[in-house]
Amino acid sequence: MDIDDIRVKINQLDDELLRIFNERALLALEIGHIKKKLNLPIYDPKREKLIFERMKQINPGPLENEAIVRLFERVIDESRSLERVRAKGD
């Protein structure tokens, strides 16, 4: 494979990541809706810790676990922000 072939594959993966991020966000919004009905807090540090631990356990590399945690922290933070914005509008 040459650099252009690799870039095509990266673009395909980026497209898939975008789809997955948005699907995950929609699910987070559903959870936010349920939390609001049950009067539960949006932020759940125990759940986040479980996610990070699970990701580290199944991480095949080459990204180090710390990098995986940082990526998931960002994804979760954006989901939490979305939940808060939508909760205010409900």
Image (spheres, rainbow, N blue to C red):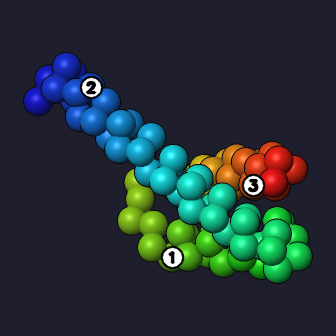
Q: What residue sits right under mark 3 in the picture?
A: 83
State if disc 2 and disc 1 touch (CB < 8 Å).
no
Q: Residue 13: x and y, percent?
A: 32, 40
Disc assigned to residue 57: 1
Could you tell me how far apart the alpha carbons at marks 3 and 1 are, in whole angstroms? 27 Å
Which amino acid type corresponds to the residue marked 2 in the rendered image?
Arg
Foreground disc of the pair 3, 2: 3
Q: What residue sits right under mark 2 in the picture?
A: 7
Q: Identify the mark nearer the N-term, 1 or 2.
A: 2
Say which element carries label 3: helix
Which amino acid type corresponds to the residue marked 3 in the rendered image?
Glu
Is residue 44 in sight in this rendering? no
Say which element carries label 2: helix
Could you tell me how far apart the alpha carbons at marks 1 and 2 are, in whole angstroms? 29 Å
Say which element carries label 1: helix
Q: Residue 35: x and y, percent?
A: 78, 73
Is residue 22 in sight in this rendering? yes
Number of other residues with Cα within 10 Å of mark 3, as a class: few under 14, some 14 to 19, many 20 or more: many
Examine the rendered structure and indicate whether residue 66 appears above or below residue 89: below
Q: Residue at x 19, y 19 (%)?
A: 4
Number of other residues with Cα within 10 Å of mark 2, as a class: few under 14, some 14 to 19, many 20 or more: few
Q: Identify the mark nearer the N-term, 3 or 1.
A: 1
Assign the C terminus to one quadrant of the image: bottom right
Which amino acid type corresponds to the residue marked 1 in the rendered image?
Gln
In the figure, residue 69 lies in which quadrant?
bottom right
